Image (tube, rainbow, N blue to C red):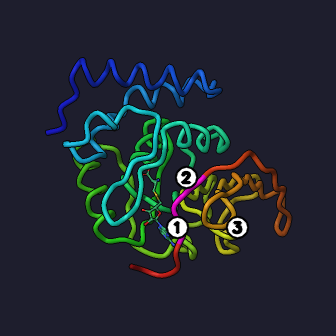
Amino acid sequence: MIEDSFMHKGLRRKLVDQVHSKGISDQRILDAMLKIPRHAFIDSSFLKFAYQDQAFPIASGQTISQPYTVAFQTQLLDIQVHQKILEVGTGSGYQAAILAEMGARVYTIERIRKLYQTAQSIHRELGYPIKFFIGDGYQGLPSYAPFDRILVTAAAPCIPEALKLQLVTGGILVAPIGQRDCQIMTKCVRTGEDTFEISTHGSFSFVPMKEGLE
Ligand code: SAH
């Protein structure tokens, strides 16, 4: 059972106010953050870190993204209810929960089996109809494509070609692109069969996107 007390809700309210004051204005994102118990995605002995606006280590040397970063990527994606979204890098499953709470149909892929299993079991309790996959996100999910939106939550040296081609025309991909310590948040809109419009949105730091399964 995931306990969600008044204390958790109070901490969440403070976190949401902080994310808002840092420039996230989309009320649907703030509402989703207010609703999702972030503490459920973090080991219970680290409860006090759950509602700080910071990234935090999870299993297998990976991290749950900073709440502001989750909100920032989600804002760039500009998601609409019922859209089909591919998330690359399930990690804790927190970002997937935010997207599902906003009404998207979420497909999420992870290369580390332990994380895939843990995220799935948390979601079984939360009850969001998210589809989980184990695999190499560089390949995307060709048999479920095309997607309205693609969100990459690990750092890649360039936008994976296979992912661009799994977007619908008019679809948006958001990914942190660059080398190990610092990446540029990149938005890629598919404007036609072979045409893409790229824009950049500041620097961030993510764990690396790796090829193949662990
Ligand atoms: N969205 C996550 C953040 C995860 S950190 C959250 O909300 O918690 C990035 C994740 O991407 C890690 O779990 C890492 O294992 C995963 N990852 C890295 N390379 C990958 C790849 N090629 N395919 C799928 N997942 C990958």
Report how far apart the C-alphas of labels 1 and 3 lie in the structure. Answer: 19 Å
Relative to residue 142, is residue 46 drawn left or right? Answer: left
Which amino acid type is shown beneath numbered disc 3? Ile
**Ligand 1 within 8 Å, label 1 CB:** no
Q: Name the image quarter holding residue 45.
A: top left
Magenta residues: mostly which secondary structure?
Answer: loop
Q: Which residue is denoted by mark 1 in the rendering?
A: 144
Depth order, front residue of 92/85: 92
Q: Secondary structure at mark 3?
A: loop
Provide residue 214's location: percent of width, then percent of height.
39, 79
Labels 2, 3: front one? 3
Q: Earlier in the sequence, mark 1 or mark 2?
A: 2
Is residue 164 within the magenta segment?
no
Relative to residue 95, is residue 42 drawn left or right? Answer: left
Report how far apart the C-alphas of labels 1 and 2 lie in the structure. Answer: 10 Å
Which amino acid type is shown beneath numbered disc 1? Tyr
Q: Are marks 1 and 2 in contact (CB under 8 Å)?
A: yes
Residue 116 against residue 99 in the figure, above or below: below
**Which residue appears at 45% of the width and 46% of the height?**
55
- Can residue 86 be seen by looking at this rendering? no
